[in-house]
Image: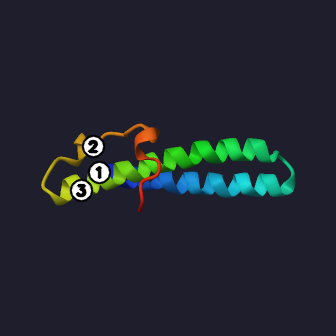
Amino acid sequence: MEQDQQILARITAMVEDERKLRESLAAGDIDSTTEHQRLGELERELDQCWDLLRQRRAKTEFGENPDEARVRPSSQVEGYLE
């Protein structure tokens, strides 16, 4: 479960990064192209973290080793419905 907590902490940090990016855009510190690029990167990484967490929880639920879950490529996890 410690690894699950680490994944959740990373997700929380990325959500905070998203908020800061939006604030930077609003303040004029960055342009919309930069914001869009960085948000895209964050969103892909967030998708991967959520997918990894779901994999770990499913493995635990079915009596498997959650440490066998692996980060999948963003192209594979993007577009999943929650």
- Circles 1 and 3: CB atoms closer than 8 Å: yes
Q: In this view, does 74 lie to the left or right of 51?
A: right
According to the picture, the residue beneath numbered tag 1 turns out to be: 55
SS for callout 2: loop
According to the picture, the residue beneath numbered tag 3 turns out to be: 58
Q: Which x, y percent locates residue 66?
A: 23, 48
Q: How far apart are marks 3 and 2 (CA)?
A: 9 Å
SS for callout 1: helix
Q: How far apart are marks 2 and 1 (CA)?
A: 6 Å
The kind of residue tagged 1 is Gln
- Circles 2 and 1: CB atoms closer than 8 Å: yes
Q: Earlier in the sequence, mark 3 or mark 2?
A: 3
The kind of residue tagged 3 is Ala
According to the picture, the residue beneath numbered tag 2 turns out to be: 69
Q: Which residue lies furthest to the right in this view?
A: 28
Q: How crowded is mark 3: few (under 14 residues within 10 Å), some or many (20 or more)?
A: some
Q: Residue furthest bottom?
A: 82
Q: Earlier in the sequence, mark 2 or mark 1?
A: 1
